[in-house]
Image (cartoon, rainbow, N blue to C red):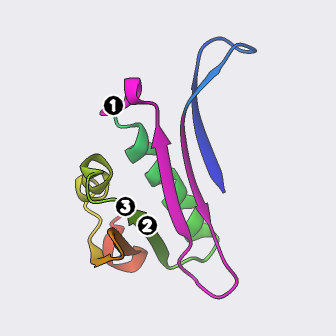
Amino acid sequence: MAFVGVIGETGRERLIAVGRYMSSANSNFPEIAFVVHENYRGKGIASFLLQQLIRVAKSNGFEGFIAYVLPENTDMLHVFDRLGLVAERKFEDGVFKLTIRFENNMKR
């Protein structure tokens, strides 16, 4: 499942953001990832994409997400914090592994 952010006129859109999750047969926690063009960071795009992905994932019966975030990517870590998502954080192999459980986090 993926959502994209585009700008521009129809037929001449430019892709500026992607948020996606990918499930596997052996886990009820799909992996989530984002990319936002550097000129559009800090505008709430990743937060919006995350909210939409959570909505769809919950409706598809998933329990949460797994995210792998580099330590220097503090902006992405803050996206989860700003939305009030309490994530279990483990530092493994040079990256943070975040486990987000919907039952603990979603007040909506």
Give the amino acid at mark 3: Val
Distance between mark 3 and mark 1 Cα atoms: 20 Å
Residue type pointed to by label 1: Lys
Judge whether 16 appears above or below 74 on screen.
Answer: above
In the image, which disc is placed on residue 43?
1
Depth check: 90 or 21 in front? 90
**Front in this rendered view, residue 6 or 107:** 6
The residue that appears at 66% across and 57% down in the rendered structure is 1
Q: Position of residue 3 (x, y in %)?
A: 61, 45
Cβ atoms at labels 2 and 3 below 8 Å apart = yes
- Residue that label 2 marks: 67
Residue 69, numbered circle: 3
Q: Secondary structure at mark 3?
A: strand
Instruction: Identify residue type, mark 2.
Output: Ala
Q: Earlier in the sequence, mark 3 or mark 1?
A: 1
Report the residue that reaches farthest toward the right.
Answer: 11
Q: Over which residues does the magenta segment extend?
A: 17-43
Which quadrant, please, contains the C terminus? bottom left
Magenta span has 48? no
Viewer-side label of 3, 1: 3
